[in-house]
Image: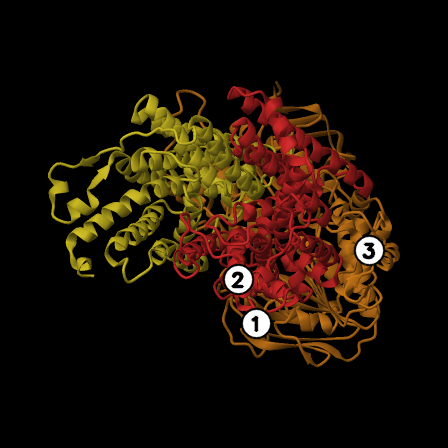
Amino acid sequence: MSQDAAASVSAPESPFERRTISLTTSLLAVLAALGLGAIILVASGINPLTAYGAIITGSFGSSFALGETLARAAPLAVVGAGAAVALRAGAITIGAQGQLVAGSIGALVTGFLFAGAPSFVAIPAAAIGGMVFGAVWVLIPALLRAYMNVNEILSTLLFNEFAFLLLAYLLNNPLKEPRAITPKSKTIPENAALGDLLGGTRLHAGVVAVAVVIALFFIWTRSVAGYRYDLYGENPQLAHSLGIPGRRVLLNSLLISGATAGLAGWMQVAGLLGRLYENIAEEIGFFGLVAAMLGGAQPLGIVAASLLVGALQAGGLHMQSTEGIPATLSDVIQALILLGFAVRYAPQITAIGQRVIRSVRTSLGMLPHQRVPKGKTRSRGRRSKGAQ
Amino acid sequence: MSKLGEITFWTATISGGLRLATPLVLASLGETISQRAGVLNIGLEGFMITGALTSLYVAVETSLVVGLLAGALAGAGLALLMTALCVRLNANQVVVGFGITILGIGLTGYIFRLTTPLGGERRQIDIAEEIRIPGLSDIPFVGEAFLSNSAITWLAIGIVPVVWWLAQRTVFGLEVRSVGEDPDAAYARGVNVLRVRSVATLISGFLGGLGGAAITTAMVGVFEPAITAGRGFIALIVIIMVRWSAWGVAVGSFIFGFSEALGTNLRNIVSDEVPTEALAAIPFLVALIILVVGARRARMPKSLGFNYIPDR
Amino acid sequence: MNDGPSAPVFEVRGVSRRFGATQALDEVDFDLRRGEIHALVGENGAGKTTLAKITAGTLRPDAGELRLFGDIYSPRRRADGSAAGVAHVRQQLSLVRGLSVAQNIELGRPRPQAGRRPWPRRFKSASARAEVERLAEELDLNVPAEELVEDLPLAVRQQAEILISLAWGARILVLDEPSSALGPLETEVLVRLCLRLRDEGTPIIYISHRLGELAELADRLTVLRQGRVVVAGADVADADMHQLAELMIGDISLLEVQRPRTRAGEVRLDAVGLKLSVEHGAGLKDISLQVRGGEIAGVVGVAGNGQEELAGVLSGQVRPDSGTVLIDGSDVTGSTARAVANGAALLPEDRSAGLATSFSLAENVIARRVGDPVFASWGVRRMRPVRRHARSLSERFEVNPPEPDLPARSLSGGNQQKLMAARELEIDPAVLVASGPTKGLDPHASRAMRDRCWETARRGGAVVLISADLDEIAELAHRVLVLSGGRIIDRFPTEEMTSARLGAAMAGLRIEEGDDVSPQGVDS
C-alpha cells in the first residue's frame, strides 16, 4: 500500500551502503538545519558566526563546557534509551517529562527514608525509588493503552500536567524549604547524594548510570525478548499470529520507558541539583524523545543524538549569557534537524515512524492485534487494499 | 461553599468556559478537516503558538482584526511547511508534527526573548470587549452566561456551521472525506489527493493560528513562552471524543473550557479546604475521562496518518 | 475519419511503459471498434492493467500514441480521461468505501469546462440520489443510492461503478477483471449488463485472464504476454481457446494438472460448532470441519462469505463466540500462542500481515524460532547461526536473492510469499491454513507455492486451502467445502466438482443436509 511505498523506492540495500548513506544524509540534515538557523539569525540582525562560535565554545570550548555538555546529554540518553524501547514496540510517550518529575520526587523521598543508611545502600535505594515512581506514573496510561486502546501520546501528556501539579503542591507544602523565595525542596541527604565526577564541572557520578543503561539497551536490541517487542512494533498482526502477547508488550515497554525516565529524574535530584525545583525536568523528557527519534532508536544513534542535543543546549545557554542571543535558538535548530531527519532517506527513522503511526492509528480505533469484537470489522482486508 | 449556589458563580463560569473554549474550537475545527483528509497533525500546538505571537505583535502595531488575520496566516505558513514535508515529500506525519511543535515553541520563544529584554516591558494590548446582542443578552442567566461574548468567540461560534457545511454539503467536503478514507479509490475517481490534502492542512493551519491568536489578542493580551499550554494536544483529545464532527468539536471544547473555568473559579471559593493544584487538575482530569470514553467509540478516517503516493 | 460500423473508436499505437527494471508494455497496438466487446487477456503481469490505466489517464505512457474517436488523446490525469468519456472500472474498484453511492457519483465528476466554477461547489444530495435511482431503474439494477459503499456486496459495488461511469457520460468502458471476485450467478448478471451496454452503443474493453467466460461475451480478443501483443484482435468465434491458453502462458508445463497423492492419516485439525458474528461480513454460522493429516481441504465461495473469519478462527487469531478448535487433540481456540506451540502455520491472504517488511530476511525467517537454543543463548540472539540458517532456508525455498541481510521489503511479491512460506513451513506444521496463497503471483511463483502446500500435506500436515482460484482448488484439494453466508453449504470430493454444482452452492442455493432450511444462505 501507499504508506509503505516510501520505504520501497529503489532503496540501496547493502548494509554498508545503507549505513554510509544514512550517515551522510544525517550530516546533511544537521548542516541544513544550521544553515536555516543562520538565516534566522541574519534576519534578526545577528552575525551567525558569533552565535555559532558561542555555541561551540559553550559546548566543547573548555573542560567546564564539556562537562556541561555531558551533564546535559546524560539524562537525555537515559530517557532516549527508554523511549526507544517503547518506540521500537510501536508506543510513543510524550510523558517522559512527567515520569521524570515523578522519579525525582521518588528519589528524594526514598533518599529521606534512607537518611540513616550508608551510601552504598542509600544511593541505589534512591535510584530504585526514582525508577519505581517513574514506572508508576506511566502505569495508568500504559494500562489504558494496552487494555482500552487509549492513545498514549495524549494520556501521558495529561499525566505530565498531573506530575507538574503534584510537584507544585509538594514544593508549596510538605517538602517546602521554609525560607526559600522560589519554591524548592530541602536538599537530599548527604549519603544519598552523588559526588562530582570531574572537579570544577557539574558532571556528577550519576552519569555512570548512563553507561549501564545504554549497555542494557544495546543488549535489549539483541535479545530474544527485544526481538519479540520489535516484531510487535513492526507488524502487530504478524506478532499476534505468532503468539506474541501484544498487551504485555505494550504494557512492559511503556513501564520500561517510565522507569528509565524516573532514573533520569533521580540523576537530576541526586546528582545535578541536589533538590527539587519547579522546573527540575527542564525539557529533558521531550528532548530525550527527540534524541531517541534522531538516533533511530538505536543505542549508538541515541548516544550521538544526545551529545548533539546536549551540546546545543549547553552552547545555547552560553550563547545567551555571553552574547545575549536567546538560547531557544538551539531548540529551533533541533526542531529543524528533526524535520530534516523526517525527510531524509533513513531506513531506521522511517521504520520507527511507521510503527508509531500504526500504533497511533491503533489507539484511535483500529484493532489489529486483538480479536474482532462483536460489531467491529477487522481492519486487515481494508488496509491491504491496493497493495498490489 | 455557599457561593456554589449563587447564580453569578455559574454565569461567570459558563461565560468563562466559552471564552476558554474559543481557541480550542478554532484549532480543533481545523484539525478535524485535516484529519478527515488523512493528515494527522500533532503539530497543532506549534501552529497555535506561532499564531499567538504573530497576532499579538501585529495587533500591537495595527489593529485587532489585522492581528487575528496575521496570526491565522502565520499558522497557515507553518502548515505550508507541514504540507511540503508530509504531503509532498512523504515525511512521517508524527515525527514532523512533533518537530513542528518544537519549532513553533522554539521560534516564538526566540522572537519573544529578542524583543523583550530581561526586565523590559512586554508588548500588550487591551483584550477585545464583549459584544452583547441587544435584547437577547439581557435575558437573565442565559444572556449573561451564553450570549455575552467577545468578538472572537462569536467568530468561533460562527465558524462551526461553516465548517459543518463545508464538510457535509459541498463537493470539497466529499473530497476531503474520500482522501482520508480511501485515497487510492479517490485518486482513481479523479480526485487530486495531494491537492485536497494540502488544502485541508492549510485550513487547519489557518484555524490553528487563529486559535492561538484568540489566546493572546482576545483572552490574555500579552504573550509568554509556551502560552498555549498544551491546548493543541487537548484539541486532539476533543477530536477523538467527538469523532471528527464539527458540532461535536464545539460541544467537546466547551466541556473542556467549562471545566477549566470551573477549576479557576473554585479556587476563589474553596482554596482553604482544597489545594489549588488539585483544582487546577480538574480540566486535565476531565480531558482524561473524555479520552478514555472517546477512545472506545472512535471511528477514524481509515487512512489517517498514512501518506499517499500516486503511482505515476 | 472513417465512420463505418467497424470504425475504431479508440486506438493505441506503439505504446510502451516501463516500471524500474520491468518493461510493462512494449510497443503495444490495440483498437476498439464501435459496438463491440474487445477482450484483453493475459496472465498476471502481462501488462493488461497498465494498458487500462494508460487508457484511463491514471498512468502516462513512456512512448506511443492514443486516439479517441479519431482525435489525439493524451490524458494527463484520471480526470481528463473521465472528461473525454473513458471510464475505467478497476479490479479493486474505486468507489470510496466510506461514502454512499450518491456521494460517489459527485466525487471527481467531470465538470463542464464552460463558465466559472464557484468554489466550494455545493453537493446536492437529493439530486445525486435521484440520478442514481433513475439510472438504476433504466439499467434494471438494484443499486441503493444512500447506503455506504462498504456495506454493499462486491457485485453491487461493481454495478454502482458502471452506473456512475454512465452517469458521467462514458463513451467507452474499460472493465478490469470484473468477474474475478464474482460467483457464477453474479457473473451472469454482469455478462448480461455488458451485452446490453454494447448493444446500446457503449463499446467495452473487457480484461480477463479467464478464457472460458469470453466465449459468450467478447467479439474479439487480444492476448498480451510480458508486455507484448501475441494475438491481436482475433475474432472470438474462430479462436482456439487451448491454443490461446498456451500462447498466454508460454510454458505448457504449468497447465498440466496432476493432483498429488498423499495418504490420509489421523484427524489433526478438528473444529466444532464455530460461530462468530462480525459487523461487516458474513461471520461464521455453526461451522464444523475435520481435516486429516496428509489431506488438503479446499474452501471456496464468493469473497466475503466467511473465508477471512474462518482463517482467523482456525489459526487462533480470532476467538469464536462459541465452538472449539483442536490441533492433534489440544484446544487452541482463540490463542495463537497455543496454536503456534501445537504446530499451526498460517499463510495469510494479505502478505503485509505476514511479513515484517523492514526486518531483514534472516530476522523474518527466524520469527517462529527466535528463542530456539540453536539461535539464542542466555536470552540473547546469536546472529551467525541465524544468518547461516536463513541462507540455507532461502535456498531450499527458492527465495531470490537469498541474502540474509536484505530487508524483506526489497523482495518481489512472489519472493516475499516464499519467504513467508519458509518461515511457516520449515518445521513441518501439523496444520496449515493457507488463504489465497497464490493471489497476485506470477505463474512460476504460484507453481512454487502450490508445491509447498502439497508438500506440507505429503509430510503429514492437515491443510486448509482457502482460495478463490477454482483451478487451484481443482489441482490441490482432496475435497471441497463451499462457504456461503458463513455456512458450509456443500461439501464433496474434488472429483465431483462441477461448475453447475459449485455455482449453485456458491450462490447459496444449496443447503447442506441437517442444516435449517432457508432459501438463501446469505442473510447478512
| Mark 1 chain | C
- Give the residue type at disc 1: Pro
* Residue C506 appears in view: no
**Residue that label 1 marks:** C320
| Mark 2 chain | A
- Across the whole image, how many numbered discs are drawn on residues? 3
Chain letter for yellow, please. Answer: B
As helix, strand or loop, the secondary structure at mark 2 comes to helix
Q: What colour denotes chain C?
A: orange
Residue A268 location (% of width, % of height): 57, 52
Graded by Cα atoms within 10 Å as few (under 14), some (14 to 19) or many (20 or more), the crowding at tag 3 reads some
Q: What colour denotes chain A?
A: red
As helix, strand or loop, the secondary structure at mark 1 comes to loop
Residue C484 location (% of width, % of height): 58, 65
What residue do we see at 31% from left, 54% from top?
B263
**Residue that label 3 marks:** C448
As helix, strand or loop, the secondary structure at mark 3 comes to helix
Q: Quadrant of residue B65?
A: top left
Residue C302 location (% of width, % of height): 60, 59
| Relative height, residue B29 to residue C374 (above, below) | above
- Give the residue type at disc 3: Ala
Compare residues A363 and A72 and report the one nearer the observer. Answer: A72
| Relative height, residue A255 to residue B243 (above, below) | below
| Relative height, residue C513 to residue A384 (above, below) | below
Compare residues A380 and C450 and report the one nearer the observer. Answer: A380
Instruction: State the scheme by which the image is colored.
Output: by chain
**Residue that label 2 marks:** A106
Q: Quadrant of the N terminus of chain C?
A: top right
Q: Is residue A14 left or right of residue C502?
A: right
State which mark lies toward you, 1 or 2. Answer: 2
